[in-house]
Image: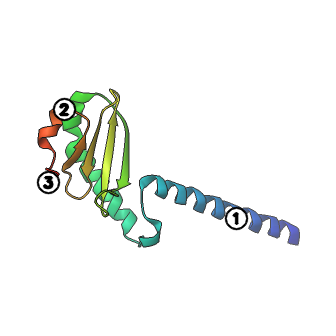
Amino acid sequence: MKSFILVVLGLIVAVLVIGGAVAFSFMNELGVNMENIDSNSIENIKDKVSSVASSESSSSSSDGDIVSEIVKFNEQNGEGYYREVTYSDGGFRQYDTESGDLIGSSYESDQKNLPSME
């Protein structure tokens, strides 16, 4: 009986360790800085991504199907996050997660809408 309880506890610990590793990997893919995360950061990121996705979905429909959407840390700016949307035609657009503004694009038609780099 003791060995059965030890096996069950061992399985529970293994599941927790594997789950933590998967969660850490998932957060790294999203570009979340794990050293500075607090309890509300994940919810804030999810809210920002969903609001940007819903407000910008109509403008991307003419360029093809969305292949992927990834939220990344804005290393060039040193703070904040942006959402990178990749389309089936190979193009991409980058949106600021806070304002929803277009901040980068591979499409020539979008270049006039991008913020000035000066």
Please identify the quadrant where the C terminus is shown: bottom left
> For mark 3, does the 10 Å Cα neighbourhood hold few (<14), some (14 to 19), or many (20 or more) residues?
few
Residue ID for mark 1: 12
Q: Is residue 110 above or below residue 42?
A: above
Please identify the quadrant where the N terminus is shown: bottom right
Q: Which mark is residue 79?
A: none
Residue 89, position in %: x, y?
32, 26
Amino acid carrying label 1: it is Ile
Q: Which sits earlier in the primary sequence, circle 1 or circle 2?
A: 1
Compare residues 66 and 28 and report the one nearer the observer: 28
Q: Residue at point 35% right, 28% down?
A: 88
1 left or right, relative to 34: right
Residue 3, position in %: x, y?
87, 68
Residue ID for mark 2: 108
Amino acid carrying label 2: it is Glu
Q: Which mark is residue 118?
A: 3
Amino acid carrying label 3: it is Glu
Residue 49, position in %: x, y?
31, 53
Q: Is residue 31 visible?
A: yes
Q: Which sits earlier in the primary sequence, circle 3 or circle 1?
A: 1
